[in-house]
Image (tube, coloured by chain):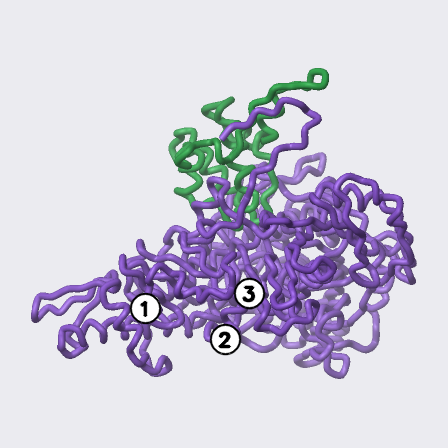
Amino acid sequence: MRRLLGAHQWRGDAVLLKIVTIEGLSPTASHPVQLAWAVFDVPQCGYRQSGQIMAAAALLAKKPKPTDEDIDAAMTNICRCGTYQRIRTAVHMAAGDKI
Amino acid sequence: MTMTVFSKAAAPSRRDFIVSVAAAGGGLGLGFHLPFDIDPAAAEEAGAEVNAWVVVKPDDTCVIRIARAEMGQGTLTGLAQLVAEELECDWNKVATDPITPGRNLARKRVWGDMGTGGSRGIRGSQDYVRRGGAVARMMLLQAAANEWNVPVGELTVSDGVLSHAASNRTTSYGKVAAAAAKLQPPDAKTIALKDPKNWKIAGKPLKRLDTAPKLNGSKVYAIDVKLPGMMCAAIKDCPVFGGKVASFDESKIAHLPGFKRVVKVNDSAIAVVADTWWHAKTALEALPIVWNEGDGTAQSSATIAERLKEGLSATSDNGNWQVGDAPKAIADAAKKVEAVYATPFLAHATMEPMNCTAIVSADKAEVWVATQNAEAALAALSEVSGLPLDKCEIHRPDLGGGFGRRGGSQDYVHQAVAIANEFPGTPVKLIWSREEDQAHDFYRPISQFRGTAGLDADGNLIGLHLRVCGQSINAFSNQSAVVGGKDMRQLQGLWQEPDDAQFGYTVPNLMIDYVMRNTHVPVGPWRGVNTNQNGVYLECFMDEVAHAAGKDPLEFRRALMAKHPKHLAVLDAAAAKAEWGKPLPPGVHRGIAQFMGYGSYSAAVAEVSVSNQGKLKVHRMVLALNCGHAVNPGQIAAQVEGSVAFGLTAALYGECTVEQGRMTKLNFDTYEIMRLAEMPKVETVIVPSYDFWGGVGEPTICVVTPAVLNAIAAATGKPVRTLPLKNVRLV
């Protein structure tokens, strides 16, 4: 959620924001990120995965073909289960890269 | 769903996570938010319980009962694979039912142990769950044979479809399940289980059964539970371990929004109850509390380190085993090597903080909690509510991380029920803040190590003395396991006995001993428990000895492992995959380590570089694992990859420091967790030997750090003897 908030600024006391949460990514959970996450069985405990998925979706919305350095810089969410390797692979897949 | 927020002054809108029957895996939601006076079997949409392990629905869906906790380690899927393999059902029609301790108790523990830890979820269950699947299969076959009036031996079954070739008839599990459920089951112990070589479901890297809800926000964790009329509680325990509450002034916060009451939970903890957790936390923060901090305030990381250092030279020990006469052999040796190592307290830092929701009424009590030991949680609920066990129930959503924190003390259950007792009939949700979670862990125990080695004139290892000095988990929480002052648990991985965590080298004169030095800090099992620090101590010291002997670290080890073929095999497998010996790009260096734990054999090779400024980059890790049988190689690889992150995070940053008796690193700004950018490329080599059952969730963590440290030493010429690395100048 904070990925999308970051692009806006507070002005005075009132601000209009459009916030997209994990449920809003796709009504059928078929956003490319969600599909790639399913292909690689990315989640372990899953507690952090909504944040990871949203961070990946926000990255791809800004940079459709991210490099590994782009992924390093954008995917700063913590994962205690350590699913980072599969996250990286899944982001590349969602971007349409050859895996 | 998109939301539009009109004012930054409005409270952030929260999604409503209603506990729902659709949230549990498989869409059946059994045992989860059911009023527990309804028989779950009756609620199962006309499925027939063939035996305790398998319920079959008319549409051929096979619901497999799961007793162990799922915390990301994939045990739910693995156990289902083992049952389905023997059951011969259609894997695409499998669902799971995570049974509860109340149901287990009501049926005389027909599902056995629910505790999940020690990497035993698969290996501790595999025999009886496979038999459970096989018994169900045999009953379904018999039911079909009875219906067709043919000998059961003439039937075959595959993917839940039963066939009688001679009469060209088929039927499916769904059609015969009701009849099967009425049959007398065969004796499970006499069944011949399938040879793993012939496995079609188990042994395959199948997709997890429980991924979908994790991708779309629908998964419900205990912390998400929302019940009608629910109140929320925030809690603070005395920051100094062993301290107590002296006084608090409720009048100062009574006016705050949503405030209900202050509850003194026990001698050392105060909770504030409010309408929302934010209101509770805010009020708790404003509550004046006077602590009686006690003697613990005199303790610090410095005082603890002094005690450990003194213990390294103690004349008596708290457990040892030896071969020959190591002190003499070392004293007489041509060359001696000695080094002292130190590793810190570590926190579990589960992403889902400790939390528990409880509702206590006159005649029943329920809890929703993330736990690795639901039966212990049930006992805690009964004890604190005062209600008998059969009036209690634990709802156990999957855990947002366990790592050993949620298996022992069910402290958060004790607390939540004590608070709920004050509000009969009202659900109360207790959540720990991250600071509270970091401040009140059962930490990986602190320790130090002295290694002393003697080499002969040819660089052969002739004497080795390994001494570990540190805090004992058993002394803190399982005193009956400390017999005559002896506690060998802290030497895990350095044991003489085979099969679990055996020392993998043969040395003619060997002494391995443990000196106990306890502190006021609570300690407990942290994923991998004592294999983690012992792996660093042994494998980093072995590299120092190899270096002193002028020998290649791999060859130096291999020469000592002829009597430990399984340890040697994983070492060789990791080295082969890493192409040990092949030239690396300039500035890249390798390190190697091997260790045994939880019945499994692990080895790792790390490739790292260290810049001229001392900045570390871990490029690649190769991990080899022999866990005996491999039920789901895809999930094993995931566990291995995760273990690299778990071990590396600890190596880079992990450190819980004590000042004035309390923990000081209370959030992820100071207790850093590794991010994706620091994750090396991980390659996993599984080398199963099929002649034992070893664990997977923990064994590979302990070889990650020593492999990395050994690679750093190769890069810089200087061994690293203290952790975490963020405190060490590498060049």
Rate crowding at label 2 as few (under 14), some (14 to 19) or many (20 or more) other CA atoms within 10 Å.
few
Protein chain holding label 2: B
Point out which mark residue B116 bears: 3
Q: Earlier in the sequence, mark 3 or mark 2?
A: 2
Q: Which chain is green?
A: A
Mark 2 and 1 residues: CB-CB less than 8 Å, in contact? Answer: no
Residue B10: x and y in percent read: 68, 28
Hue used for the chain lettered B = purple
Residue placed most toward the observer, B194 or B102 = B102
Per the model, the C-alpha gap separating discs 3 and 2 is 15 Å
Protein chain holding label 1: B
Per the model, the C-alpha gap separating discs 3 and 1 is 23 Å
Q: Nearer the viewer, mark 2 or mark 1?
A: 2
Name the secondary structure under disc 3: loop
Q: Earlier in the sequence, mark 3 or mark 1?
A: 1
On the same chain, marks 3 and 2? The answer is yes
- Residue A87 drawn above or below residue B397: above
- Residue, x 76% and y 46% (percent of image)? B666
Name the secondary structure under disc 2: loop
Per the model, the C-alpha gap separating discs 2 and 1 is 22 Å
Residue B105: x and y in percent read: 53, 74
Residue picked out by circle 1:
B86
Residue placed most toward the observer, B653 or A14 = A14
Left or right for B724, reference B309 = left
Residue B67: x and y in percent read: 48, 66
Residue picked out by circle 2:
B109
Residue type at the position of mark 2 = Arg
Residue type at the position of mark 3 = Thr
Residue type at the position of mark 1 = Glu
